[in-house]
Image (cartoon, grey):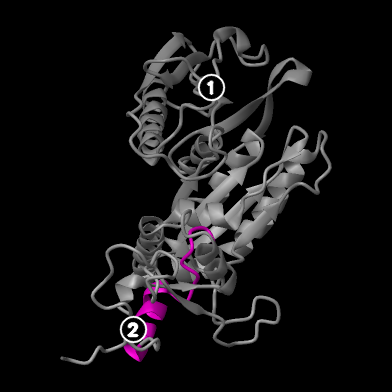
Amino acid sequence: MSAVITPSRKIPELARVLICVRAGGRCQFDGCNKYLFEHHVTLTEGNFAQFAHIVAFSEDGPRGRGRRPAKIHDPANLMLLCPECHKLIDSHPSRYTREALTAYKERNEKRIKHVTGLGPEYKTSILIVKSRIGSQTVTVPIDHIIHAIAPRYPYSRDGLTIDLTQISTGESFIQSACETIKEQVGQYLSAGGEVKKSGHISLFALAPIPVLAFLGRELGNKVALDLYQRHRDTEDWTWKAGSKAVDFDLRQLRPGSSNEGAVLILSLSGKVTLADVPAAISSDSAVYELTLSSGTPNPTFLKTRQQLEGFRVSYQMAIAKIVYEHPGLKFIDLLLAVPAPIAVLCGRESLPKVHPQLRIYDNDRAKGGFIHQLTL
């Protein structure tokens, strides 16, 4: 009769190392992600992790009944947890089943493997621009940023935040905001700044349309730039997947005899009509409209990165057509009803040595319609 061998409760060292590495040193309970090798208050380094069995060491333990793994200390049966999450799952084994914990573990390890496999070429500098929109100020949580920019990751946690909320509202707001942007973006793009090291910018911006257009002009196209949109339905900044393509049409709403100026209306987040063209604009100016090929202009139409790129190409073609049809054009009056990323693109895609000046108009309901705010 052979002796019964009772397995040791001691988890082998190799299994411990593998679990710590695969978990990235973080609690694997879904939504926790606590770093376990530094005290969360004092930041003192130390091992504050616990190893938990998905199927308990003992049959009488949590999730111990039923089919058991051949090796109870196999890394596939172990999780790295903080003490609180360890206590939670073992106190409620019917809620935190084998299947649920295995799914938690797999999601964590897949994410850690992906993130740690990213190379330096995926670094990006974070730029946040925030301003009051009406009476509200929208913040951009760091977890929203991390999720939105993946597979890129921030060059630094701080990046640059241009805070326009402290500027007094009123007649001088646009001018003051643009001066602030010019100064801070200049420093941001300077030779010693992090943008020169990362070579890439991820922009999260909400501000009045003219300010965003000016921001795009200041950023220029010498540094690679990804733009992000705050989505109203989910209140996050991650571009959506699987949305259908959006096509854009350029239409001439009114012919014009003037080769000095022309009008380009962008009816995307709202409808702008001929009746909205300010009386201050010459009636001899031709009026064009760039709008959605199908569907009604609305604030939520822009959902994917591909749709934004489609607009960029259509916008370039629209400017080229207007310039071609009106030789010697000195300026184009832009009447914009657009989402924030498109306002930035309008400024960024302007080529000072090729294109006429862009005169940016914004719809000011308090003043009865579109008002000229600045010239790029």
> Dividing the image into 4 quarters, which one contains the C terminus?
top right
- Residue at left 54%, top 43%? 236
Residue placed under numbered mark 1 in the picture = 261
Does residue 89 appear left or right of residue 55 in this picture?
Answer: right
- Residue at image x 34%, y 24%? 247
Magenta residues? 12-33
- Counting residues from the N terminus, which is met first, the one under dot 2 or under dot 1? 2
Q: Looking at the image, which residue is at 47% across and 71% down?
A: 197
Name the amino acid type tagged 1: Gly
Residue 17 colored in magenta in the image: yes
- Is the residue marked by circle 1 packed among few (<14), some (14-19), or many (20+) residues within 10 Å? many
Circle 2 is placed at which residue position? 15
Frontmost of labels 2 and 1 is 2
Note whether residue 280 is visible: yes
Q: 229 or 163, which is in the foreground?
A: 229
Q: Nearer the viewer, residue 155 or 13?
A: 13
| Residue 122 rendering spot, x and y as whole percentages | 39, 64
- Does 228 appear in magenta? no
Residue at position x 80%, y 49% from top? 166
Secondary structure under tag 1 reads strand
Going by the image, does 254 lie left or right of 68?
Answer: right
